[in-house]
Amino acid sequence: MKKVLPLIAFFSIIFLFGQEKLDLDYYLPNDVNYNSSIPTPEKVIGFQVGKWHASHDKIVQYMYALAEASDRISIEDRGKTYEDRPLLLLTITSPKNHEKIERIRTEHLKLSDAKISATVDLNSLPLIIYQGFSIHGNEASGANAGLLVAYYLAAAEGEYINELLDNTVILFDPSYNPDGLQRFSTWVNMHKNQNLSIDNSDREYDEVWPGGRTNHYWFDMNRDWLVSQLPESQVRVKTFHDWKPNILTDHHEMGTNATFFFQPGIPSRTHPLTPKLNQQLTAKIGEYHAAALDKIGSLYYTKESFDDFYYGKGSTFPDINGGIGILFEQASSRGHAQQSDNGILTFPFAIRNQFTTALSTQKAGLNLRTELLQYQRDFYLNAQKEISKDKTKAIVFGDASDRSKTFHFAEMLSRQKIKLHKLNKTIRTSGLSFTPDDSYIIPINQPNYRMIQAMFEKRITFQDSLFYDISAWTLPLAFGMNYADLSNISALGSEINTLTFPNGKVDEKSNYAYLFEWDDYNTPKALYQILKRDLRAKVAMKPFVLNGKKYDYGAILIPATNQRKSVDTMYDLLSNLARETGLNINAAQTGLTDGIDLGSSNFKALDKPSIALIIGEGISSYDAGEIWHLLDTRYDIAVTKLDTKDLSKADLGKYTTVILPNTSGSTLNTSLDNLKAFVEKGGILIGYRNSLKWLNEHKFIKLDFEKTKPETKDITFSQRQNFRGAQVIGGAIFEADIDRSHPVNFGYHNNKIAMFRNTTVFIKPDSSNYVNPIQYSKKPLLSGYISKENLKGLSGSIPFKTSNLGKGKVIVFTDNTNFRAFWYGTNKLLMNAIFFGKLM
Ligand SMILES: [Zn+2]
C-alpha cells in the first residue's frame, strides 16, 4: 500500500479502464501508514472497491467488520427501511472521546440553546461532522467511496489522523437510501461486461423503470428532511437533532458529461432565512475541496448551479439548524465506465473524487473547528434576538373535526424538536375556535425559532425567479390545518412531552345504525375496512342533525340490520376500527332526523373500490409512488400496480377504479381501446396533471385549456434559459374556492382550500357553476413563485373536472393532490374520487 501511485488522473483512467490493477493505492493518501489489523474492504466484501457496485448488504457487512476491529468506531442500527434494511450509523472518533461521548454530545447541544450556550468552552469541544452518502441510490459512487472513507478513518495512523479524531466526532451514515442502492447495484452488476462497455447505449446504463434513485415507494428522499414523512428520514432527522452537526455532507452524482460540483451554489438562490455567514463558511470549506481536487487533477466547478433554497434537501436542511450543509455532485458513470465529454469516465474515478472530498471535509472541519462552533452558537443567539422583535408570540393550531391530521401535524413538528404546549383555555380568533382537547400551541420563544419560521412562513417575493426545487412549502397550508398567530402567550398550558394518538370509540351499541362524519383524515381507512368486510355502508348527500349533533355532507351511515354480521360482531368490529383510526362513531337508535332521515334516497350505497394504479415506462414514478404509498401505508387499501407495457391486454373489468398518474401518455397509445372500454362499461378513470392532455386528445373528456403566452421581445440569447425557467411552476401554493355539497369536497369544512401545483395545465371553467366545484380564486397565490403570465392563466381556472363516458366516469385533477406525502390537506380529494366517484 505504500508504493507510488500514478499521480495523473489521465493515466489512472487508462490504467483502470482495463481494470487489470485496481488497488487501494489509487484512492488512499499514499503518505500514510495503515494499521494492518483493520480489514480492508476487499478482504470483507470479496472485491476491490470500484470493481463492482457494492450492494447494501455488502456495505452493512463491512461496517460491522470495521466496528468490530476498531476502537475508534461504534455502530448502531437505528431502524429499518420499508424493505427492512438496517439504517446504520457509525460514530467515529478517538477512543478517548468515545469514553466520554455522551458528555461531548450534551455539551455540544448547549450551543443550540442561547440561554446556556455561553458556558460552553469552544477550545475543548470537538466539532460534529455528519457524513452521508448516496441518498439517490443510483448515484452510487458516494456510498462506494464510503467504504474507503470508513476504512481510512479506522486504519490510518499518524499525527494528522490522531488530531482529527481528537477534535471531531464523525457521524458516518454509510447509505442514506439502502433500498434504492440495493436495486441499482443489482441492475448495473448484472449487466457488467468483463471487457467494460463504454458505449452509453449499453443496457447497463439504461436502468429499468423506476430506477434506483428513490426508496421503496419511489420517493426522492432528498426532499424529505424538513417534513420527514419517510422512515429513513425520521431516523436521520433524529440523529441530526440528537447531535446538531456543524457540517453535514450529501454526496450525489449528476450527468455523465459534467465534472464535479461542490457548494456554494447559485448565491441569489439562498433562502433568506439562512445567514450570510453560512454561505461564506461554505465557500471557506470549499477551498479545502478545491485544493484536494487540484492535487489529484480533477476538474470541478462551484456557484453556477444548484441552490440552498428548499430546507427539505439534505444540504440545505442544516442551514436552518446552525450548521453548514454541503452538496457534492460527481459526474456519473451510472455503471462501470462510460464515454463522456471528459474522456472515459470510470466508476473508480468517480469514487476517488467522492473519497477525496470526504477527506477534505474532515480537514476543513478540523481547521475551522472553533469558527464553526462559534457560528453555531451565534446562530442561536441571533435567533433569540429576532424572537424579541417578532410581534407573533405563539402559534395555535388544531382541528376538533380532524384529530388524526392534527396529530400528524404535531408529530411532524416534534420530530424537528419544536416544543408544543397544551392550551389552558379555548381561543377564538379569526373566525376559528381552538379547544384545549384538540389543539396545540407553539411558543415562538424557543431555540428552534428559525425552524418554526421555515415551516410556517408564506413568501411571495423572491430575489430570483428560478428554483432548483419547490418555491413554497408552508406546512399548515399543506396540511389544510386551522392555525392562527397569537400576540400573547396567555393561553399557554404545560409543555407536551409525549404525543398521544387520539382516542376513538363507538359511543354505544345499536340495533339500528351507526354514523360517523367524513372530516377526519383517517375516515377512508375506516370505510375501506367496513366495505372490505362485506358490511353495507352509505354516504349522506346532504347534512342533517341527529341527537343534537350536526352531520355534514359525506357522513357515513352503517345500518345495523340486514348485514352479513351480527349486531354484536359489528359492534366489536367498529369499536376496533374506531380505536385504530381515532374516529368517533356514533350509534343511531332512530332513523328520524332533523334533515334527511336515515332511510332517505339522499343516502347513497357505496361499493368496495377495487383499484388499479398505472405504473411503468412513461408514467412519473414520483407521482405513482405517492399514490401507492398513500393507499398502501396510510389507508391500508389494496392496489394493483399495472405496468403500461401490459395495459393493452389487462383484464380491467376486475377493477372499479383505474388511476392514471402524471404522464405525457406516449406509452398509453396501444392501450387506448382497452382503457376506453373500461370506462364505457362503468369504470372510473382518475387522471392527473399532464395525462389530461392525452385524455382530452383521445376524447375521454372534453377540456378547454387556457394557453399562456409570455412576452419574449427583450430577451437575449444568454438570458433564454432563465427566461424559460421563470415560466415553470416548480411548486407553489394556491387558493381555490370549493362547493362543499359536491362529493369531491366531502369532508372539507371551509369554503376555501390550499392546493399545491407544479404544472402549467390550466383548464377554463365551465359556464355552469355547479360543474366547477373547485375553482382557483381571482387572486390565488398563497405562497411561492409564479410568473405574471401563469398567474393570469391560473386565476379562475379549475383544477378538477369530471364527465361521463358511456356508463363510466372520467375524473381529472390538474394538480398533484398527494405531493411528497406531506400534502395531507388534499389527500381527501383523491379518496373522494375513489369512494364517491360514481356520485359525481
Ligand atoms: Zn442526487
Image (cartoon, helix red, strand yellow):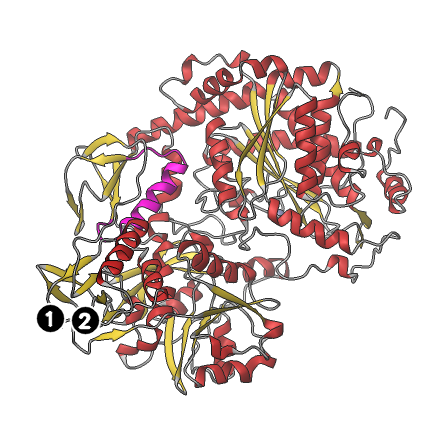
Could you say which quadrant of the image residue 163 lies in? top right
Which of 406/129 is in front? 406
Quick check: marks 1 and 2 in contact, CB under 8 Å? yes
Q: Say which quadrant the C terminus sits in.
A: bottom left
Specify start and end residues of the magenta stretch as a single range.
399-420
In the displayed structure, 495 sits above or below 519; it is above
- Around disc 1, counting alpha carbons within 10 Å, would you say few (fewer than 14), some (14 to 19), or many (20 or more)? some
Query: Circle 1 is placed at which residue position?
Result: 595
Asked which quadrant contains residue 493, the reply is top left
Mark 2: few/some/many CA within 10 Å (<14, 14-19, 20+): some
Q: Which mark is residue 542?
A: 2
Most foreground residue, 632 or 488: 632
> In the structure shown, which secondary structural element does the residue marked by tag 1 occupy?
strand
Q: Position of residue 68 (x, y in %)?
A: 67, 24
Magenta stretch contains residue 293: no
**Furthest-bottom residue in this view:** 806
Q: Hey, what amino acid is under mark 1?
A: Gly
Asked if one can make out residue 618 in the rendered structure from this viewpoint, the answer is yes
SS class, disc 2 = loop
The disc, 1 or 2, on the residue closer to the chain's N-terminal end is: 2
* Residue nearer the viewer, 141 or 764: 141
Q: Is residue 393 visible?
A: no
Q: Is residue 778 above or below residue 154?
A: below
Q: Amino acid at mark 2?
A: Lys
In the rendered image, residue 403 lying in the magenta stretch gets the answer yes
Q: Residue 201: x percent and y percent?
A: 78, 63
